[in-house]
Image (cartoon, rainbow, N blue to C red):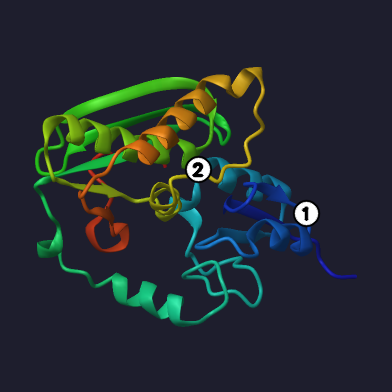
Amino acid sequence: MAKSKYYVVWEGHQPGVYSSWPECQKQTSGYKDAKYKSYESRAEAEQAYRDGWKKHWGQSAGAAKGKSTATGSKTGSYGKRQAAATNIPMDQIDYDSISVDVGTRGNPGPVEYKGVDTRTGQVIFSKGPIAKGTNNMGEFLAIVHALAYLNKQGSNKTVYSDSENALKWVKQKKAASTLVRDESTAEIWELVDRAEEWLRTHKYTNKLLKWETRSWGEIKADYGRK
């Protein structure tokens, strides 16, 4: 009898722990830059989910069969790009910028975010904790908050985020979250709705760039919750 595996989906349509590959595949198929991994026991998978993808994703042990351990997707051109990305020199960092990041306790769970000066680490703005939301929603709000802040300052500074999903949502002017709208999530959804409205009604020329964690270490706004 085949040994059971449990699948952690950190970045997907609906993050969580799943007990079969078809369930995991349903949450990751068609989701750009999905992050997921298999484990031998539910306890191990649940702990990995709580730890977050930055601690576990990309490690070779227990990676889902047939998947690239570097990318969480089928091996291909994107996997090659990621391998190359590990060699991006520090001198490519634009230090005249704002870096943003989110801190969560569970996903979904309480969410907070902040923006800092990339050069000094000085906190420029912060928000939260918001009662209940997801990591991606917090990342999205942090980027839009930075854009709105810089817009008021008349500044064209770059904004860094380590979340490819949130950067994609900002460019699409739409947060593609599957978090249920109910009383417990009303606060974060109100903020997300306002952020989407801001994106629809304002123009900006600021560069939105991915912080290359593998090359540069943790983003300056990191909460250290690994």
Write the residue at 65% across / 50% down: 45
Of callouts 2 and 1, the N-terminal one: 1
Name the one closer to the observer, 130 or 62: 130
Which kind of residue does numbered mark 2 sit on?
Ala
Q: Give the residue at mark 1.
A: 19
Within 10 Å of disc 2 (Cα), the crowding (few <14, some 14-19, many 20+) is many
Q: Specify the quadrant of the image occupied by residue 38.
A: bottom right
Residue 222 visible in the displayed image? no
Q: Position of residue 173 (x, y in %)?
A: 43, 45
Quadrant assignment for the C terminus = top left
* Residue 142 relative to residue 8: left or right: left
Q: Position of residue 91 (x, y in %)?
A: 9, 63
Write the residue at 39% across / 21% down: 128
* Residue 102 relative to residue 61: left or right: left
Q: Is residue 71 above or below residue 194?
A: below
Disc 2/disc 1 C-alpha distance (Å): 27 Å
Q: Are marks 2 and 1 in contact (CB under 8 Å)?
A: no
Quadrant assignment for the N terminus = bottom right
Which kind of residue does numbered mark 1 sit on?
Ser
Q: Position of residue 106 (x, y in %)?
A: 55, 33
Q: Give the residue at mark 2.
A: 175
Q: Marks 2 and 1: which is nearer the front?
A: 2
Within 10 Å of disc 1 (Cα), the crowding (few <14, some 14-19, many 20+) is some
Q: Position of residue 161 (x, y in %)?
A: 31, 48
Q: Specify the quadrant of the image occupied by residue 203.
A: top left
Write the residue at 49% across / 59% down: 57
Residue 175 visible in the displayed image? yes
